Image (cartoon, rainbow, N blue to C red):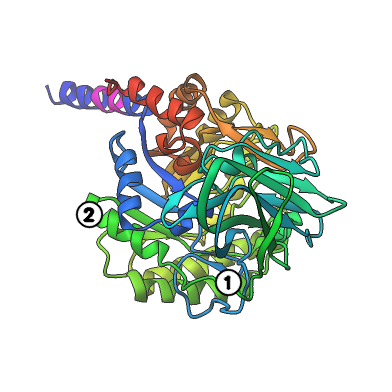
Amino acid sequence: MKLAVIFLTIIISFLSAFAGATEIKNITGAFIQLDGQLSQFGENQWLDELTLMKDIGMDTVIIQYSAYGERFYYPSKYMKTDEISPDESIAELVWSGSARTRFVKIMIEPTSAEWTMIPEITVRKGTDVLSQGKPYTVDPQESPNYPSNGKLTDGVADYAWGAMVGWQYPNKPIEIVIDLEEILSIDSVGVKFMRSEISAVQIPSKGFQVAVSNDGKSFMAAGNVTWEESKQGAMNDTLGELLKAADTLDMKVFLGLSLNPSYWSGEFDPKEQTNNNQRILTELFSLYGSHKSLAGWYLPEEIDDRNFLTQSRKDGIRTYLKSMVTYAKFLTRKPVMISPYFGISPDGEAYAEWWDYVLSEAKVDIIAMQDGVGTRRTTVAESAEVMKALKSVMDKHGVRFWVNVEVFNQIHGWPVDAGSWQAIPADIDRVVDQLEMQSPYAEKVIIFDFPHYMTPRLGDGAKDLYEAYKEYLGLGD
């Protein structure tokens, strides 16, 4: 009888383990990259965005980074206050005046090293936007890689290459003429510019000029505006506003620390980055430690299987992770998360051995492995094999193993082509394949990222993916 009970227990345990290993999980969290319009969101806007996430079963938010180079998404004592425009951001320059006109001409003298990128132009009277949906002309012609297609007056100013109009090495000043279609009183013209030093995109240092006309032929100068005349207002507390919304909705938030943009060029100094991120973590905890939604910390370095193979590089990243985890636990008693990735034709067994070595000293709490499908580095099947190979190592070291599903489809940039990086929302069939093949090896499924590729707020493909996923969950109308 005793042997029968033992045998039955073994069978039940085996079946339970097998069932757990084949369980298909739903998406329960998402990255948020704070850029462009998102960096200006207030609590109510975050409540709307996070509610959309919660309505489809998401309970966790991971902020990609709280600081990117010199760009801070909270009022940090380390931020430079004399910057005209922070790096990796969208800055708006606003001309204020008074005129009655039908046509508004904006003249911009480019001073960028290569690209001038504009996501939106807004002509207003008070709080009324008069230019939304209105036709316009541009001269010289924009780059075919970043065509106009009505983007400058569509009401959307996301920090996304595909959402902007771009000019590469323009040989004369850029002139944009907006037709309001009737004579109206205006009192401001705002132009949003992108800045990305790593991509050779700078804002026009001389600002822009405004001219007005009732017939579209004879224009009268209305004035100009420079950055010095229109300093940006006080820095928004983007993180604080988001955490307040997450508190209300009982959601968990992992705050990303700081990332140096040179990391993408292969530069990484473990000691320097440790010192920088320990001071950032200390400041973030002092500002936001009282929020019940603050669940932990995210280290934004996306560690890969190609750039940390030498012993010195491998030891450097292990030392960095160990130092940050130790410091975070000592100061805050909250977990630390990372989201690495792997490249083309991945070797899951070799990558597992690499992580076994790193995790032997760096006791990271959560690893959310990127699946590489959206960036075309791997297929869904290849990615699933890597997840399978990694799971035993994660279990060995007590690491909570999550999968980071890419819900976008890269359309430009390496390895697709030689253009600048662009992506569009993925289709639901591919996302379902990712969930079915990868999620059985993970404790939790998160995505990159919700506000750019899955929110119905953006309409078009992002809304389609959101609604299709709702239907997949059986939550459709």
Q: Are marks 1 and 2 in contact (CB under 8 Å)?
A: no
Pick the residue in front: 334 or 193: 193
**Residue positioned most to the right:** 171
**Residue at left 52%, top 55%?**
186
Q: Quadrant of the N terminus?
A: top left
> For the residue carrying disc 2, how many other residues have a C-alpha within 10 Å: few (<14), some (14-19), or many (20+)?
few
Q: Is residue 441 visible?
A: yes
Image location of residue 283, percent across then percent down: 42, 76
Would you say residue 21 sits in the magenta stretch?
A: no
Give the SS element for disc 1.
Answer: loop
Image location of residue 155, percent across then percent down: 50, 43
Name the side, left or right, on which 145 lies relative to 119. Answer: right
**Residue at left 49%, top 28%?**
460
**Residue at left 45%, top 22%?**
432
Give the SS element for disc 2.
Answer: helix
Vertically, is 437 above or below 245? above
- What whole-number distance in Å separates the C-alpha atoms at marks 1 and 2? 35 Å
Q: Is residue 163 visible?
A: no
Sequence-wise, which precedes: disc 1 or disc 2? Answer: 1
Vertically, is 417 above or below 49? above
Amino acid type, callout 1: Ser
Image location of residue 42, percent across then percent down: 36, 58
**Residue at left 40%, top 22%?**
468
Give the residue at mark 2: 248
Give the residue at mark 1: 230
Amino acid type, callout 2: Thr
Pick the residue in front: 373 or 97: 97
Query: Which of the 4 quarters of the picture holds residue 15?
Result: top left
Name the side, left or right, on which 382 lies relative to 360. Answer: right
Write down the region rendered in magenta.
Answer: 11-16
Q: Quadrant of the C terminus?
A: top left
**Residue positioned most to the left:** 1
